[in-house]
Structure formats: structure tokens, C-alpha cells
Amino acid sequence: MTSEMLPVGVLTPMADGLQISPGRAGFSLSITGLVTAVIAPVVPRAVGALDRRVVLTAAMVVLAAGNALTTMAHGFGLLVISRVIIGIGMGAVWGLSSAVATRLAAPRNASLAVSLTIGGVAAASVIGVPLGTLVGSAFGWRAAFASLSAAAVLLAVGLLLALPRLPRPTAPAGADNHAAREPLLRTTSVSVGLVLIVFLVTAHFAAYTYVRPVLEERTGMSPGAIALLLLVYGLFGLVGNFAAGALAARRARATVLSLAVGISAAIVLLALFGTIAGVAGVSVALWGLAYGGLSVAGQLWMTQSAPHRIEHITGLYVGAFTAAIALGAFLGGTIVEAASITPLLWSAAGLAVVALAVGTFGPNPARQPHRTGDSISGPEPREGAAAKQTAGTSA
């Protein structure tokens, strides 16, 4: 996630170093998001029966290569190539990580496992982006990306050592074969959830991609103060991630709608009172708290809507999510180039309100009928299912 999001923290010096505008530099997030959106939904089918541990390890190597190329970029062309490569690695990670997490934990801990995994998003904000911003300020933005490349290589080795073999998951006992073949978008709660996520994530990234210029121009903050505020954003995001995971396991729809209200309010506060440093700080903290919980709450919404097809629903969800990242970064850059920061904030707030309306009037995934053999956490590990059958209970 830090590989994807680091341009947010080093946007201004990165644009200066590449001799391009900040708006154009921000498009680099769009490139990564768009590629990830294409790759993530097809990953479960494309890798077939391959060991998921090997696939995730290979994805880390791809991320290392992409970050290394970014450090070599001296213009927009090579930057585009490097961000495409990062998008390929991100697609594999996003498409499989949550599904893998549920297989590594007992079924009763599946929601916590997803929260821990998606906590990597918040951890990128808490540690990755602020640390990358500090490294970029001290040693140059290229050093920040070089550090990520080295970290990805170390993580690839760690995955091989730490994870067990993870072949393609088998369908749960008693699962409906017809349901497994039915297009997921025909499930109403799935389609409504995806539309909500697209609007809300687009709104978030349209504004958040340019949070550094917002704080520089409207609030007059120094680079050090901005790095500190991004750390605050990440800390609140980490809190939001685990709080939303616990709540969404029981009431996914109410949790996502509450997060939509928080994101909308934060952006509106920044648009109205962003010139006041204290209010800007509160807005960014609220923003982190709300957006930090969105990934896990949205994932649980999707899982509850199609628990019998966890890898495929994860890939579809990630595709929509990352496409919205690309759309948001592109939309934000377009508005910044054509108008200014303030119209960008109001446009993002409007999209967030639309997302809230979609979720409010759509169906509740918790009320969708589940077929026999389904489970909220998706397919059980084969050992767990066998143990339950041996005990004479229903899997």
C-alpha cells in the first residue's frame, strides 16, 4: 500500500524532480489504480491451482521492480511504466490477501483476520507514507522509493518462510453449484455495495491525492507539519480500521454509511475552514478515522453478500475499489489543473454525499438470504471442515 500511496507524501518534490506539474504527477496514482483494477478481478482465475504463497511472493518481487524503476525516472514516460508494474503487483496482492487471511484463521476469527490484513492500508498511512515523506525530505524522493524496493525484496523472502502452502481453496460442503456460476453483479447487495464504494473512494482520492497542496496553499503548513499531520491521519485510520471491522462483522451497511458520513463531513470542514490550522487538523483526523475503516467494512459487506465465492467477490471488490482510486486521482488532477483546490474539495464532498444516498436506499446485505453451506467468512479451511464433520456437526 505504501508503494501505491507514497506519491501523496512526496507529490511536490516528485513533480519538481520530474519537471512536470503536481496534477500530472498525481496521475501516477490513477495509473497504478487502473492497472490494479484490471488485474485484481482476474487473479483468482488466472493463477488457477498455483500456491497462493508463491503468487504473493512473486507480487512482492514485481513491486520491488516497479519501485526501483520509479527511482530511475527522469520524465513522465518511465514514471508511467514503473507505475504500471506496481499496479500489476498490487492487483495480485489486493486480489488474494483478504481471501488468504480467512484461510489462515479459525472461522470465528475470520473478520478479525480480514481487519488485520486490511490494517496494512492504515499501517501504510501510519508508518509508510509519513516515513517515506520524511525520507524524501531528508534524502530526496528517489531514496524513499528505493527504500520501498528493498523492503519488498525482504518481504518476499519473509512470505516464503512464514506462510504455509496455500493451494486453490475448495468449495464448502453443500455449496450451491448454480450460485457459484451465477454472475456476482446479479446479487443486488453486491451491485449496490460496489456502486457505493466507487463513489466514496472516488471522492476520497480526488481530494486526498492533493492533500499536501491543500495544506500548503490553504493552511500554510511546512513540510514537517504536513508529515506530522499525515501521521495523525494514519493513526486515526488504524483505529478506524479495527473499530469498523468489529462493527461491520455485525452490521456492515450501518458501518459503511457511518463512514460515508464521516468522510463527507471531513471534506466539508476542510473546504469551509481549512485555512485555520486547528480545524484542518481535526478534519484530517476525522478523515483518517472514517476512511481507515472503509476498506475492511466494504470487504465485509461484499463477503456477507456472497460468502460462497470469497476469492471472486474479493477480486471484484478490489477491482472496483482500485478503479475508483484511479478515477479519483484523475478527477482530482483534472479539477486542480482546470480550477483550484477549493472547487476540488466541494466536488469530492458532493460525490461522498451521492455515495451516502446510494447506500441509504439500497438493500441491506445482512438481510440477503444465504444458501445452505454458506458462511460469513467464506470457504473454511479443509482441516476445520473435516474436524467439524468428524465431531458430527454441520460445517
Image: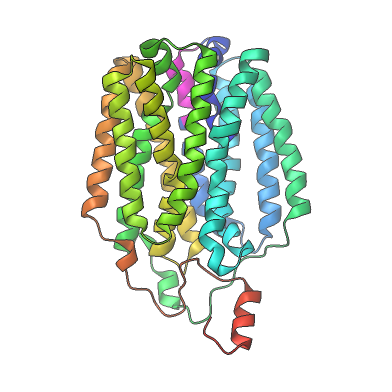
Q: Compared to 119, does 68 lie above or below?
A: above
Please identify the residue farthest to the front as the structure is shown.
278
Residue drawn 69% across and 33% down? Answer: 65
Highlighted range, magenta: 20-29
Res. 129 image quadrant = top right
Identify the colour scheme used: rainbow
Secondary structure mostly taken by the magenta-highlighted segment of the chain? helix
Figure disc tally = 0
The quadrant of the picture occupied by the N terminus is: top right
Q: Position of residue 318 (x, y in %)?
A: 47, 48
Res. 71 image quadrant = top right
Q: Is residue 344 left or right of residue 60?
A: left
Q: Position of residue 132 (x, y in %)?
A: 61, 24
* Relative depth, front residue between 255 and 163: 255
Residue drawn 50% across and 66% down? Answer: 377
Residue drawn 58% across and 90% down? Answer: 392
Res. 384 image quadrant = bottom right
Q: Is residue 149 left or right of residue 191?
A: right
Q: Compared to 61, does 380 lie above or below?
A: below
Any magenta on residue 22?
Answer: yes
Residue 84 can be seen, yes or no: no
* Relative depth, front residue between 236 and 340: 236
